[in-house]
Image: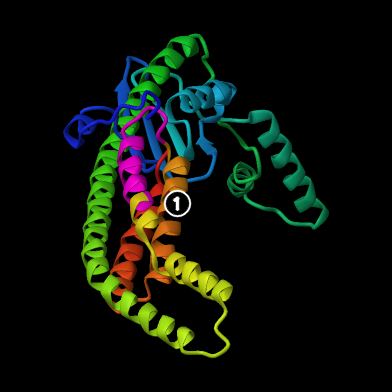
């Protein structure tokens, strides 16, 4: 940590929690004029990707809505749906576009006359009403629109709050999973240390045998012997890797409880953990340790997958 201090696991649990990109929030508010429903769904994404479904009469508020979403949700794929229904004596939000429908009707009638047909007038009107833009989907009376927007904004903020709470709850469950995976890797690392104690005598015996063969060789080269010895010591020694891996595991737990924690940073630490695990596996040259390495890798893949869904 920045100040060099270490927290106990119990203390870490009482600090900050991760926040998932998976979330859901819905709110409903009814006033004298409208019934408002706001639904927000979020999924993981590298960036903040917002898709809005907004009634046409409030389309000019989309930028403001996007700003509210950006301030609250930070990152992820966001599906925002706003539904507004009039209540009481509110003027209907859909009306017939009379001028356009009349033009459609006249054109249909003229076309029928040119074809020497005598269509039913009701049928002509029905066809005209089915033509494009035959209806105005906007509220005729906009006198209370500002007040309606105030109600809508309250509903938006409430849905965002619920979505954030959902994300925090998902983040808490993910955090618990991370701790479980890290502790499992630590358990396997402890087993590696125990197996390493049994491995060292076998390595020593192998080195001694090779040394005897070199000494009995008439072409024995002291310089080459020294190089070979250094090579084998470095090749088989996993002490530093075990220390670094243990430090990375601790750092992962500490980082995910700090304000700097995010999915990208945790994924980076996971990559460092994987590097040490791979090195242990390649240097150990021991079947039992190889099996433990495979199990550690399995837990690490779970961690990497989960970090993709953290903000």
Any magenta on residue 272?
A: no
Residue 54 percent across, percent down from the top left: 51, 32
Residue sticking out furthest to the front: 218
Residue 34 percent across, percent down from the top left: 37, 21
Residue 272 percent across, percent down from the top left: 45, 51
Would residue 68 appear left or right of 200 to someone viewing this image?
A: right
Nearer-the-camera pick, 85 or 228: 228
The N terminus appears in which quarter of the rendering? top left
Residue 18 seen: no
Nearer-the-camera pick, 210 or 75: 210
Q: Secondary structure at mark 1?
A: helix
Would residue 55 appear left or right of 185 to someone viewing this image?
A: right
Which residue is rendered at x = 30% and y = 43% of the image? 250
Nearer-the-camera pick, 123 or 305: 305
Instruction: Give the mark count.
Output: 1
Any magenta on residue 249?
A: yes
Q: Which residues are magenta?
A: 244-261
Which residue is rendered at x = 44% and y = 48% of the image? 267
Q: Residues within 10 Å of mark 1 (few under 14, many from 20)?
A: some
Residue sticking out furthest to the right: 114
Q: Main secondary structure of the magenta part?
A: helix
The C terminus appears in which quarter of the rendering? top left
Residue 89 percent across, percent down from the top left: 37, 17
**Above-or-below relation of 75 to 70:** below
Residue sticking out furthest to the left: 10
Residue 110 seen: yes
Which residue is rendered at x = 71% and y = 41% of the image? 104
Nearer-the-camera pick, 43 or 95: 43
Q: Residue beneath label 1, please?
A: 272
Which residue is rendered at x = 29% and y = 34% of the image? 168
Residue 241, picture quadrant: bottom left
């Amino acid at each position: 940590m920045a100040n060099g201090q270490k927290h106990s696991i119990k203390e870490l649990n009482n600090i900050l929690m991760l926040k998932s990109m998976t979330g859901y929030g819905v709110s409903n508010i009814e006033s004298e004029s409208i019934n408002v429903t706001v639904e927000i769904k979020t999924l993981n994404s590298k960036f903040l990707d917002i898709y809005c479904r907004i009634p046409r009469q409030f389309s000019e508020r989309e930028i403001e809505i996007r700003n509210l979403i950006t301030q609250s949700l930070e990152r992820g794929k966001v599906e925002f749906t706003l539904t507004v229904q009039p209540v009481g004596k509110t003027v209907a939000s859909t009306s017939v576009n009379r001028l356009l429908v009349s033009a459609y009707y006249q054109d249909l009638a003229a076309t029928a006359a040119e074809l020497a047909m005598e269509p039913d007038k009701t049928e002509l009107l029905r066809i005209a009403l089915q033509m494009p833009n035959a209806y105005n989907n906007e509220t005729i009376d906009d006198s209370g629109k500002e007040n309606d927007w105030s109600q809508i904004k309250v509903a938006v903020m409430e849905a965002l709050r619920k979505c954030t709470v959902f994300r925090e709850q998902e983040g808490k469950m993910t955090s618990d999973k991370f701790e479980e995976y890290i502790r499992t890797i630590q358990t396997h690392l402890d087993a590696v240390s125990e197996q390493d104690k049994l491995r060292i005598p076998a390595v020593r015996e192998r080195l001694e045998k090779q040394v005897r063969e070199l000494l009995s060789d008439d072409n024995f080269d002291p310089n080459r012997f020294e190089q070979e010895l250094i090579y084998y010591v470095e090749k088989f020694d996993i002490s530093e890797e075990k220390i670094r891996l243990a430090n990375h595991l601790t750092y992962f737990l500490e980082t995910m409880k700090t304000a700097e924690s995010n999915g990208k940073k945790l994924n980076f630490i996971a990559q460092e953990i994987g590097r040490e695990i791979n090195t242990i596996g390649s240097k150990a040259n021991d079947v039992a340790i190889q099996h433990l390495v495979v199990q550690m890798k399995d837990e690490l893949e779970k961690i990497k997958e989960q970090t993709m869904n953290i903000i």
